[in-house]
Image (tube, rainbow, N blue to C red):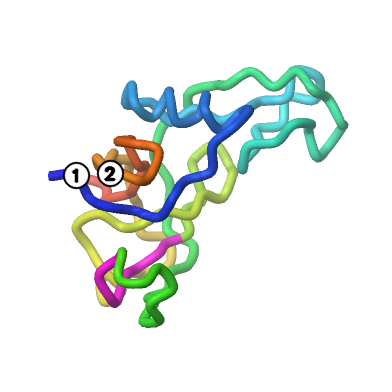
Amino acid sequence: MTEKRPDRTLGPGHDEFWAWCAQGELRLQRCADCHKLLWPVMVACDACGGTELPCEQVSGRGKLVSWCSFVQDYYRGLLRLPYDTILVELAEGPLFMANPDGFGEADCARGLPVELRFLTCEDSAGTFALPVFARQAA
């Protein structure tokens, strides 16, 4: 079932990110000059200013750093309340904000191992694969 979501950011760099997600891969930019892994999508490296930023697949594994549950209807009925958001520190280092898949605020604990999943969603631009995180299988 396709889940309705707020509009995602599209345009240079973002379109490539979403295209990789559609193929079931989480890819982030890596600066060709200083090798820093970048997130969110950037037009230039925030460490050295480099502009050659090829995308590199990451493992999709990480650990829970923080979480919150939203009770305010910021999206005018688009999302069912309350909805949870988590901050994941990817194994490769960058922080990635996402939604939990299969667990909620009551299950959250700092350092909880999580792994990537993709959820089929739809916004005004069409269907897309949204990266979410589930508790890591033992």
Q: Residue furthest bottom?
A: 71
Q: Residue furthest front?
A: 124
The secondary element bearing badge 2 is classed as: strand
Is residue 113 positioned above or below 117 on the image? below
**Residue ID at (27%, 52%):** 4
Task: Decide which of 132, 35 is in the foreground and name it.
Answer: 132
Q: Where's residue 77, x and y in %? A: 30, 71
Q: What amino acid type should be assigned to the residue bearing mark 1?
A: Thr
Q: Tag 2 or tag 1, which sits nearer the N-term?
A: 1
51 relative to 86 in the view: left or right:
right
Residue count near mark 1 (Cα–Cα under 10 Å), binned few <14, some 14–19, many ≥20:
few
Q: Where's residue 31, x and y in %? A: 73, 24
Q: Where's residue 37, x and y in %? A: 65, 32
Residue count near mark 2 (Cα–Cα under 10 Å), binned few <14, some 14–19, many ≥20:
some
Q: What amino acid type should be assigned to the residue bearing mark 2?
A: Cys
**Figure quadrant of residue 24:** top left
**Residue ID at (27%, 50%):** 134
Q: Residue furthest left?
A: 1
21 relative to 38 in the view: left or right:
left
Q: Which residues are magenta?
A: 79-86
Cα distance in 3D space between marks 1 and 2: 5 Å
Q: Where's residue 114, x and y in %? A: 33, 50
The secondary element bearing badge 1 is classed as: loop
**Residue ID at (37%, 76%):** 69
Is residue 98 positioned above or below 30 on the image? below
Quadrant, the N terminus: top left
Disc 1 marks which residue?
A: 2
Are dots 1 and 2 in contact, CB under 8 Å? Answer: yes
Disc 2 marks which residue?
A: 121
Kindly identify which numbered label has been placed on residue 136. Answer: none
